[in-house]
Every structure is written in structure tokens, then in C-alpha cells.
Image (cartoon, grey):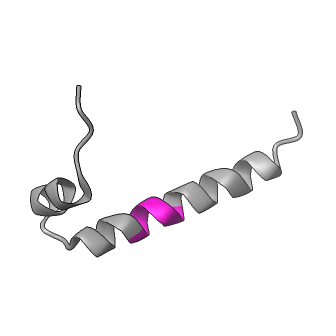
């Protein structure tokens, strides 16, 4: 299944493509922080 573009996601959720990008970057930053602190 092809991935949705930022613009497609923005239209779907009623926000700007820039906002989708910001949300993506925040999520990735949180995942990295969690992995960095994982004791395993």
C-alpha cells in the first residue's frame, strides 16, 4: 500500500502539511528519546 503524502494527510485531518511534518518530527524525537533511555 502506498504511503500517504504530507498533503494527503493534511487534507484528511484538516490541518496544514507543515503541521503534519511537525507532528511527525515530535513523534520521532520522542521515540528516539525513549530508545536512548531503554535499559535493554
Residue 8 sits in which quadrant?
bottom left
Q: Would residue 29 be found to the left or right of residue 20 on screen? A: right
User: What secondary structure predominates along the stretch shown in magenta?
Assistant: helix
| 12 in relation to 1, above or below | below
- Where is residue 3 shown, x and y percent of the image? 27, 38
| 34 in relation to 18, above or below | above
Residue at image x 22%, y 45%?
4
- Where is residue 26 shown, x and y percent of the image? 51, 65
Q: Is residue 3 magenta?
A: no
- Where is residue 27 shown, x and y percent of the image? 51, 58
Residue 7 sits in which quadrant?
bottom left
Q: Which residues are magenta?
A: 22-26
- Where is residue 22 shown, x and y percent of the image? 41, 71
Q: Would residue 34 be found to the left or right of residue 8 on screen? A: right
Residue 13 sits in which quadrant?
bottom left
**Of 6 and 14, the residue lying toward us:** 6
**Of 9 and 34, the residue lying toward us:** 9
Residue at image x 82%, y 51%?
37
Q: How many marks?
A: 0
Amino acid at each position: 500500500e502506498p504511503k500517504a503524502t504530507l498533503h494527503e494527510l493534511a487534507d484528511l485531518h484538516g490541518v496544514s502539511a507543515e503541521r503534519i511534518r511537525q507532528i511527525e518530527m515530535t513523534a520521532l524525537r520522542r521515540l528516539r528519546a525513549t530508545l536512548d533511555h531503554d535499559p535493554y
